[in-house]
Image (spheres, coloured by chain):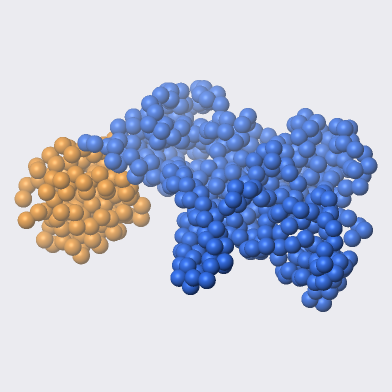
Amino acid sequence: MAKRVVIADDADFHRTVLKDILTKGGFEVVAEAVNGEEALSSARALRPDIVILDIVMPLMNGIEAAREIRLIEPPVKIIMCTSLGYEPIVEEALKSGACAYIVKPLSEKKVLAVLAALKD
Amino acid sequence: MDTSKYKALYLQETNSHLSGIEAGLLDLEKGSVSEVDNLFRHYHSIKGMSASMGYEPLMVLAHEEEGLLEKIRSKSLETTPEIIGTLFECLDALKRLAAKVEADEPLDIDISAFLTRLKALSEGKPSPAPKPVFEPTVAVQPAAGGGGAELKISNVMKVEGRVFDELLTTVGDLFMALSSFKELSQRSRSIELKDGVHLLGKSVNTLHQNILSARMLPIRDLTETLPRIVRDIANRAGKVVDLKIEGAEISLDRSILEDLGSPLVHIIRNAVDHGIETPNERESAGKPRSGTITFRAHARKDRAVIEVSDDGRGIDSEKIRMKAVEKGADPRRVAAMTRKEALLLVCLPGLTSAETVTETSGRGVGMDIVKAVVEGLGGALEIETEPGKGTTIRMELPRTTSIVKTLLVTAGSEQFLFPITKIEKVIERGGEAPSSIEYAGHEVPVVDLASIIGLPGSEAGPSSTIVIVEKEQEGEERGFIGLKVDDFGVELDAYIKPLLPPMSRLWGVAGITIMGDGRPVFLLDIPQILSRVSSRPSL
C-alpha cells in the first residue's frame, strides 16, 4: 500500500511541486497544509505515515509543529523541509522530532532519496 | 525536473509576495514593526521558490534581503531610512526580474551592487553605493515601465483579457446582425421567425452580460501600487504625504481600468508636486505638516466616479485665465467662462508646461493627456479647487465599455444614437415645437438639438418630437431639458467604439458605431450637450 503523506508549506508552489514528485514516486498525498497548525490537525486526524514540514510558515512554524506531531501515537515520521541558509536550524529540527531533512531547491532525485532512506 | 509547468504558479505567488513586500515596506517606513515577520516570510518564500525554479538572481537577492530582515526581526539591527530605501530599490529589481521570467527573457540584470549594499547594511555599515543601479523611472515617465512607477493590473488577467476583447467584438457583431434580423422579423408575419429572433436576442444579451461581468476588475487592482508611487514622488519632492483610498472594491471594465493607470499617475504626481506644500509651508499656513491625498471611488448607476483630492494649496483660477490669454486664447471667451470652465483650461496643451504652471498656478503637468484619456473613454473630467484648501480632480467614467442601449434619432438631417439611459421620456406632439413644455410638474425648456450641435435646423414639420432628459444636478431638486429632434427610429443595442484622437476631440459625441448597412453613426454625449445648454443664460 502506498505510504500516506501530509505536506505542509505556505507556498502553493512548493506544495504542488512536492505533491507531483511524491505522487510520481508512488506516495499518496492525503492532505496539504499551509501552516503548522493545519499540519498538526491533519496529522492527528489522518494518521499519515509521513509528514513533510516546511520550517518557515505563518501561525505555527515547522519546528513547533514537529514538537507536537512527534507526540502522536503511533509515531508519524517527520521530514523537515528547509531553504538555503537554514542548515543550523536543522539541528534543532532533528532534536524536535524530525528524522530527516530536505534542503530546497526541491528536486525529484533529492526528495525521493530522502524518503527511500527512511527506516520503516 | 521540468520546471516550466510550475512557472505560472511561481509567477502568481511571487507577484503576490512582491505586493506583500511593497505593503510591508510602506508600513515599516511609517514605523510599524508588526509587518517584519510577514516581510521576512515573503522574502523567504520568493527565495525558496526561485531556488526550485533555478532563477538564481531572484534567489540570491531574496536570500540577502531575507538575511537583513532576519537581523531586524531578531532586533540585532535597527531599521533606518537607508535600509528601507535600499529594500525598495531591491524590490524594483525583483519586480524586473520577475517580469523577465514572465517574458521568458534572460535574467540579465546585474544585482551585484545590490548584494554589496545589502551585505554592508546587514553588518550595520553605511551602504557603499548610494546610487541605484538603474534609475527608477518614476521621476521621468510615470506611465511607462519599471519599478514602483507602474500602475497595472494582474498579468494573468492580461492574457485572458485579450480573449475577452475578441469575445466582446464578436458580441458586438452579433448585436449588429441581430438588429438586421429584428427589422426582418418586424416586417414578417412568420411567428417562428419572430420567436426565433426573440430567443436569439435573449441569448445574445445573456452572453453579453456574462462577458461584461467577467471583464470587471476591482479598482483595487489599480490602486494597490498607489501607496508606493505616492511614497516615491513625495520622497523625491521632499513632501510628507498620507494616502487614503476609499471605494477600491468598485469594479470597472478592465480596459477602462487599464487606460486609467497613466492619467491617475499624472493626477497624483500633480497633487504631490504642485498641490501639497512642503512641511514647513504647511505649518506656517496652520495645516498639519503631512499632506493628505484621498483617492475615492463610488458607483453612480452605470457610471463610476473617481476623485483624487488633496489638501494642498489649490489652484488660482484667475491666474489660469491670465495664462490662457497670454498663450493666445480669446480674452472675451476666457472672461465669459465660468470658474469651472476656466479651471479646465489647465488641460490646454500649451498651458501645461511644468515650469510656467508650477510658478504661476501650481498645477497642470500632463493634464491635457488626462483629459484626452478620460474623454476618450466616454467620461468627463471636472476640477474643483479652493485656494489654500486643496483641489479635487473628478473623473466620471462608464463602468463598462461597448454595448449601449440607444435610440436612433434624426436631427438636422443627420442620424445620431441617443443613449436610452439618459432618456426620461419621448414626447410627440402636433405642430411646431414650443419653447417650453410641461413635464412631471416642471416647466421644461425645449432646445433644438441640431442647433446645439451646430447643424442647420430642419424645416418645421407637421409634428415635433421632444426627448426629455434629466439635468445632472448637485442639489435635491430635479431639472429637465427637452431636446427637439426631427424624428426617432428604432431602439438599437449598439456596439460603441470609442473615438480615438483626433476624433475624440469632436464635441458632443461620445463614440461611434457602424450600422448594419455600413453607415457610421455617432453616439451623442448627452452630459456634454447639456453642459452647453446650461451655460447659455438665454435658455
Residue sitting at 48 percent across and 73 percent down? B191
Outermost bottom residue: B441
Q: From the top left corner, tell me how far across and down residue B144 is, in percent.
A: 57, 33
Res. B29 visible in picture:
no
Q: From the top left corner, tell me how far across and down residue B194 is, in percent.
A: 50, 69
**Up-down relation of residue B275 to residue B193 (above or below):** above
Given residues B170 and B252, the one toward you in this image is B170
**Up-down relation of residue A105 to residue B410 (above or below):** above
Query: Which quadrant of the rendered structure holds the C terminus of chain B?
Result: bottom right
Given residues B339 and B81, the one toward you in this image is B339
Letter of the chain shown orange in the rendering: A
Given residues B312 and B425, the one toward you in this image is B425
Q: Quadrant of residue B42?
A: top left
Residue sitting at 85 percent across and 66 percent down? B433
**Up-down relation of residue B211 to residue B156 (above or below):** below
Res. A104 visible in picture:
yes
Residue sitting at 73 percent across and 44 percent down? B506
Residue sitting at 51 percent across and 38 percent down? B79
Is residue B445 shown left or right of residue B97?
A: right
Q: From the top left corner, tell me how far across and down residue A85 is, in percent.
A: 30, 35
**Up-down relation of residue B507 to residue B491 (above or below):** above
Q: From the top left corner, tell me how far across and down residue B403 is, in percent.
A: 57, 56
Q: How many marks can you see?
A: 0
Is residue B57 shown left or right of residue A26?
A: right
What shade does chain B have? blue
Is residue B327 shown left or right of residue B526?
A: right
Given residues A120 and B268, the one toward you in this image is B268
